[in-house]
Image (cartoon, rainbow, N blue to C red):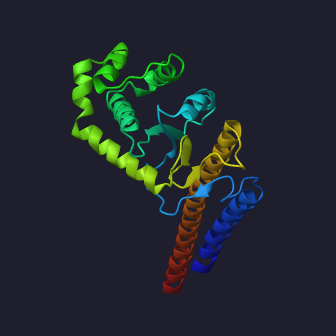
Amino acid sequence: MKIRFMTSVVSAVTLLLFAGFAQAAESKFQDGVHYTSIENVAARPAGTIEVVEAFSYMCTHCATFEPYIESWLKRLPESVKFVRYPVVFGRGTWELYARAYNTADVMGVADEAHAALMDKIWKQKEILKTMEELAEFYAAYGVKPAEFVATSQSFAVDAKMRREQRFLMDSGVNSTPNIVVNGKYLVAGNAAVANYDQLLAVVDYLIAEELATAGQATATAAAIETAVEANEVESAEVAEESAAAVVAEEN
């Protein structure tokens, strides 16, 4: 009985893993060429595939990339979470804008104001040089400037900054824009990823891989549960037969 049970489980798992390997083998994107596997994978929120854009308001390439991201977000599966982490790279102005973004994020207005701030800097050519000036910008989105400045100096924002910069450093981010998929893969422009459409195509591929892996894990768990249930039913039937045999002998 146990042998048949284990055979059912092993067969189910083997088929699921083989399907995953076959799918990966057919990919036109390669690790080390179109993306890089991250050695020290950071733990991400359970049950969600997370995509992180590493960006800076001071990066002209990020401003160019923004319309591509906005269009891409419209087709993103609901099970995938997209977040932005502003990089610092030890630069004072980049740190100022990164802190302002994280403050806006804590106060719930970062996404709403994001494209407008990019446009203000790169289309209108207006550079905001202090947190007070940035607070006045975010006031248009319903926050009080004094509260914004105070929040920018809070423990919550400090902790968020440290956590995100550590994640970006551990992920190997050294330019912008970069994309980190589920803490496992870094996607950046290079000779093999020559434009933003292709960069997002690589991201789509990696998301599909992660979704497939998550689906395989779910299917494996379901297969094991089914096998366990079948084994329990079979064991119950055997127990009933044994009991019947005992009764027959006593009679």
Question: Is residue 44 something one can see in this rendering?
Answer: no
Question: Is residue 78 something one can see in this rendering?
Answer: yes
Please name the residue shown 68% across and 52% down the image: 34
Residue at the top extreme of this rendering: 140
Q: Nearer the viewer, residue 214 or 142?
A: 142
Count up the numbered dots. 0
Is residue 168 found left or right of 163 in the rendered image?
right
Q: Nearer the viewer, residue 57 or 224?
A: 57
Q: Nearer the viewer, residue 98 or 21?
A: 98
Residue 143: percent from left, percent from top: 30, 18
Residue 203: percent from left, percent from top: 63, 44
Q: Nearer the viewer, residue 57 or 76?
A: 57
Is residue 156 found left or right of 176 in the rendered image?
left
Quadrant of residue 159 in the image? top left
Please name the residue shown 55% across and 33% down the image: 62
Asked if 251 appears above or below 145 in the picture, the reply is below
Is residue 146 found left or right of 165 in the rendered image?
left
Name the image quarter holding the N terminus: bottom right
Residue 106: percent from left, percent from top: 32, 32
Asked if 113 appears above or below 163 in the picture, the reply is above
Quadrant of residue 18 in the image? bottom right
